[in-house]
Image (spheres, rainbow, N blue to C red):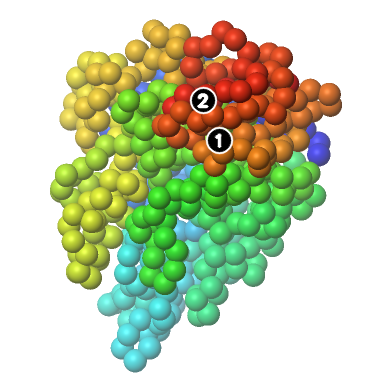
Amino acid sequence: MKKKWWQNAVVYQIYPRSFQDSDGDGIGDLKGIIQRLDYLEELGIDAIWLSPVYKSPNDDNGYDISDYEDIMAEFGTMADMERLIEEGNKRNIKMIMDLVVNHTSDEHAWFVESKKSKENEYRDYYVWRDGKGGEVPNGLRSTFSGSAWEFDEETGQYFLHLFSKRQPDLNWENEKVRQAVYKMMNFWIGKGVGGFRMDVIDLISKVPDQEITGNGPKLHEYLQEMNQATFGGKDLMTVGETWGATPEIAKLYSNPERHELSMVFQFEHVGLDQEHGEGKDKWDLKPLNVAELKKVLSKWQVSLGNEGWNSLFWNNHDLPRIVSRWGNDTVYREQSAKMFAILLHMMKGTPYIYQGEEIGMTNYPIKDISEAEDIETINMYNERLALGFSNEELIESINAKGRDNARTPIQWDNSANGGFTTGTPWLHVNPNYTEINVENNLKDPRSVFYTYKKLIELRKKNDLVVWGEYELLEDTPEEIFAYKRTLDDETWLVVANFSETPTQWTLPAEGKELIISNYDRSDVPTGEQILKPYEAFVIRI
Ligand code: GLC
């Protein structure tokens, strides 16, 4: 594989609404991000995946775009955006724009026109169908609950929305839609962005009448067309959010010879604590089985070979915080946060850090549905309550999986609202900000922050981390997650105790050098070990 800059890069995701408010309106903004670029430079990241900053009525916090070439008023202006790109570039931090083109907002000019009449020249920009016997066209469901079809009184037809009814799906079959999207992408490329993160990109090609929405027949044709018309040959990074990817599908997207995307962002490992089956989804909880996690992560490590590239992540703005989810966010918060970091950042792929993860931020459990902000959570609650679920079990699911968990404002210091805003924050700040915050992390050389910083440095300085072969060690107690990375004649052993119980294990080889660990240890681990709760280390063997 020809080496690319994004193969040894680390990406940091910013959810702008919750990152840093600079003007006291309680909502994060672009000037706030600019103020914090030095902090991100100190961490050592190469690129920022910026969740959407475009003009939007915020039905889904910016994932419903009403103008792709304008900035959301609460976030600032186009001039602020240009400055952010420039200030980022000065620090070698590239801006990766969130590209949300499966759907627009219902306030986008295209949809406003499309709704006007069946003859309107924009009618075909969206997916319109007649009902069947006074009912919806078929059984397609929205990810945000209910039917994916919404009736429009004026023209007597239904339009498709795989997300909220204020997020109508674009009709990618229409050549004009595709060309309009490419033109918009070139507008942003012209502004100097570093690439695109493509929201639910596996949904753009669909056959709604056959209820096919993911991985549709023309998906890869469209991506090749997009590549040619926009970023192809420009050394930009592109990452596709691909919920339904298997390793084979991932190669279709990311094999460099196919000229589609740089990499996939797939979710198999983060789906392991949910029940599967008829009518089940992420809200139906089951405990994580560590053996399964090892199997899934290892499968992705070995199966792409030289024919594809994967992202590495535990968190994003749609997922609960990992330290609360699979670690321990009370007594072993720092140890488990660092264990997750070490385990993931020593793997092959491009790591993503979700804002606040690098200081070990935790979930924020709610007591009542009135505290929820997220449309997905609120719709699910209402739908399931009507189906007979109890309030208690729904709140439990929300606290485990709800998207607000990861969206609480960043805790910068121990001043009011964690230093996020001088006004009233749009979403509750986690009261543990007095203890867990950036300032405290920066003061303490043993903090979670410095583990992340060191892991990033290790990736930069060691080709082994980027390119080494991966091998899972199968012969371990179930809670021990151990793997080797090998490049030429050098091998590193990564060991993690995925539990809060001390676990005995004898290392398979003599340790020669300690590379990183999450407990203070000055010895080089070798021979029999009693691994402490969530203990993790990397040694050269
Ligand atoms: C993606 C985004 C999510 C959004 C959805 C619809 O999954 O990550 O936040 O709600 O797409 O755009």
| Amino acid type, label 2 | Leu
Q: Say above or below: 514 vs 288.
A: above
For disc 2, the marked residue is 531
Q: Say above or below: 103 vs 407.
A: below
Please name the residue shown 70% across and 57% down the image. 248
Q: Quadrant of the C terminus?
A: top right
Tags 1 and 2 touching, CB below 8 Å: yes
Secondary structure of residue under mark 2:
strand
Picture quadrant of residue 391: bottom left
Residue 535 position within the rendered picture, expressed as x and y whole percent measured from the top left: 50, 25
Q: How many marks?
A: 2
Secondary structure of residue under mark 1:
strand
Q: Residues within 10 Å of mark 1 (few under 14, many from 20)?
A: many
Viewer-nearest residue: 191 or 454: 454
Picture quadrant of residue 223: bottom right
Q: Is residue 5 left or right of residue 2?
A: left
Residue 15 position within the rendered picture, expressed as x and y whole percent measured from the top left: 40, 36
Q: Quadrant of the N terminus?
A: top right
| Amino acid type, label 1 | Ile
Which disc number belongs to residue 147? none
For disc 1, the marked residue is 480
Please name the residue shown 55% across and 35% down the image. 480
**Real-space Cα distance between discs 1 and 2?**
9 Å
Q: Is residue 373 left or right of residue 527?
A: left
Please name the residue shown 65% across and 26% down the image. 507
Any part of residue 89 in sight: no
Residue 499 position within the rendered picture, expressed as x and y whole percent measured from the top left: 45, 35
Residue 382 position within the rendered picture, expressed as x and y whole percent measured from the top left: 21, 62
Q: Is residue 404 left or right of residue 483?
A: left
Q: Is mark 1 within 8 Å of ligand 1?
A: no
Q: Of callouts 1 and 2, which one flags the residue occurring earlier in the amino acid sequence?
A: 1
Q: Residues within 10 Å of mark 2 (few under 14, many from 20)?
A: many
